[in-house]
Image (tube, helix red, strand yellow):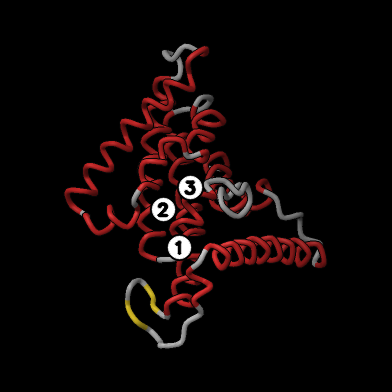
Amino acid sequence: MNKYAKITLDGIIFQNPTFVLVLGTCPTLGLISSASSALGMGLTVVVILTLSNILISALRKLIPNQVRIPCYIVLIATLVTLARMILQKFLPDLYDSLGSFLALIVVNCIILGRAEAFANKHTVAESALDGVATGLGFTAALTIMGIICEFLGSGSLFGTKIMDFKIGAFAQTSGKFLVYGICIAVFVYVMDCIARFRRERNYKPLTRESLTKEVA
């Protein structure tokens, strides 16, 4: 229980790929102008990241160490190609909104990073959980920023008009950078506040280990 709780907390909170590790910045800034696009990209990454982790973990003893990175890229590229074909067939609007960022998943540092840092060294079950947790952390971060940027930039939410007032800058790159920076700052501030609250009440420090024991 503790081991799997640690993996889950790492992926969603302590090693959140967007707010902590600041990975996958290109698709993040490219897609958060729309909450639907952000959510769609996030869920696509969840599926590809989970499947790639499972395959790489299952094949880790068969892949020669000298060519492991090219092998990872081939596996991920195959999954991305299948995902593109499925989205183009069944979800053409989402496929169009993701555009070239969908193809860039092949070299997304989040997926390659988890393959090298985790899936290559852990069991299939652990790697699958890591893929799901990390993907959900990425999806949550993208969706939150997508909601903010779409609401402020166009006055809508998931394509539905909410208000006429809008701030066009939040639909531009400069506004996205601002939202990204503020979200990171708020995330770090909240984590610091929780840690300070626990210290003031003589609780154990806010760490993966302490939270894991509480979950268990």
Residue at image coords 48%, 15%: 67
Image quadrant in which you'd find residue 60: top left
Q: Which residue is mark 1?
A: 143
What whole-number distance in Å separates the C-alpha atoms at marks 2 and 3? 12 Å
Q: Up-down: is 51 above or below 216?
A: above
Kind of residue sitting beneath label 1? Thr
- Residue situated in front as seen by the camera: 73 or 5: 73
Q: Secondary structure at mark 3?
A: helix
Residue at image coords 64%, 60%: 184
What whole-number distance in Å separates the C-alpha atoms at marks 1 and 2? 8 Å
Residue 50's tag is none
Task: Single out the residue that lies furthest toward the bottom.
Answer: 164
Q: Up-down: is 113 above or below 137?
A: above
What whole-number distance in Å separates the C-alpha atoms at marks 3 and 1? 15 Å
Q: Secondary structure at mark 1?
A: helix
Position of residue 135 measured from the top left corner of the image (x, y, whole percent): 45, 48
Position of residue 120 measured from the top left corner of the image (x, y, whole percent): 50, 25
* Disc with the residue nearer the chain's start (3 vs 1): 3
Position of residue 83 measured from the top left corner of the image (x, y, whole percent): 28, 42
Q: How many marks?
A: 3
Q: Secondary structure at mark 2?
A: helix
Residue 133's tag is 3
Classify residue 206 as left or right of residue 18. right
Task: Single out the residue that lies furthest toward the left.
Answer: 89
Q: Which residue is mark 2?
A: 42
Residue at image coords 38%, 53%: 41
Classify residue 2 as left or right of residue 35. right
Kind of residue sitting beneath label 3? Ala
